[in-house]
Image: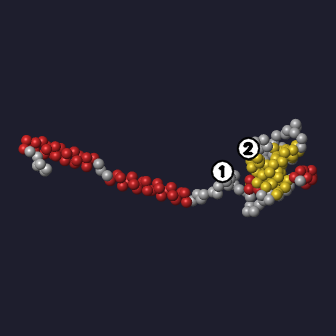
Amino acid sequence: MTGRVPGPFRRNVSAIEEGALRIGRRYRRRMDTSWWLALVAVVLLALVATLVDGWGRGRRPEGRRTRPPGRPGARGAGARPRPAEIWWAIVPYEDGPGAKDRPCLVLAVRGRRAVVAKITSKYHDERAGVIPLPPGSVGDAHGRASFLETDELREVPVWDFRRRVGVVDPVLWDQVRHLAT
């Protein structure tokens, strides 16, 4: 009985087939696939834009620090800190992990690390070894007073020095030059 439907059911089968054809025609009218091409084009454009944007942003080596925005690298090619210079650098905290961008006086440079004394704007009279600096000696735009703390020295990697401010007064340098030995 394949292909042939018995007499009384023939009428129902043809009506079912006819209904299926009508549904198929309606479905085809509703299922316009021309928008798929537009969707594929938009997805491809987004993919190309992402790839092109990524090519311009080279990968940075692991462990290398980047400068925060708004802080252009003022160091010239090959500029390294030298003793008696005042620099802005990433100086580690004295009592825990982390570091802060602050001015410091370079006391000695040994290979890839420099021994520094931090400079602060707060006077700590309870600490020994705090030496007042002339106003504006750290490149502060407001010319505030600064204080050199010589009681705790820090080691800073030379790549963490970001901007040279100037050279310390020779009289002051004679007072503190022995601290790094």
| Residue 152 percent coordinates (x, y) | 84, 45
Residue at image coords 57%, 59%: 56
* Name of the residue lying farthest toward the front: 1
Residue at image coords 59%, 59%: 58
Q: Nearer the viewer, residue 35 or 18?
A: 18
Marks 1 and 2 sit apart, C-alpha to C-alpha, by: 23 Å
Q: Quadrant of residue 124?
A: top right
Q: Which residue is mark 1?
A: 69
Q: Is residue 1 left or right of residue 99?
A: left
Mark 1 or mark 2, which has the lower sequence index?
1
Q: Is residue 76 left or right of residue 41?
A: right
| Residue 11 percent coordinates (x, y) | 10, 43
Q: Quadrant of residue 77?
A: bottom right
Q: Is residue 101 visible?
A: yes
Q: Is residue 14 left or right of residue 113?
A: left
**Dot 1 amino acid type:** Pro
Instruction: For label 2, count other residues whose C-alpha is less than 10 Å away and answer few (under 14), some (14-19) or many (20+).
Output: few
**Dot 2 amino acid type:** Pro
Q: Which residue is mark 2?
A: 97
Check residue 88 in the rendering and tell me which mark sits there, or answer none: none
Residue at image coords 19%, 45%: 20
At numbered mark 1, what does the secondary structure look like: helix, strand or loop? loop
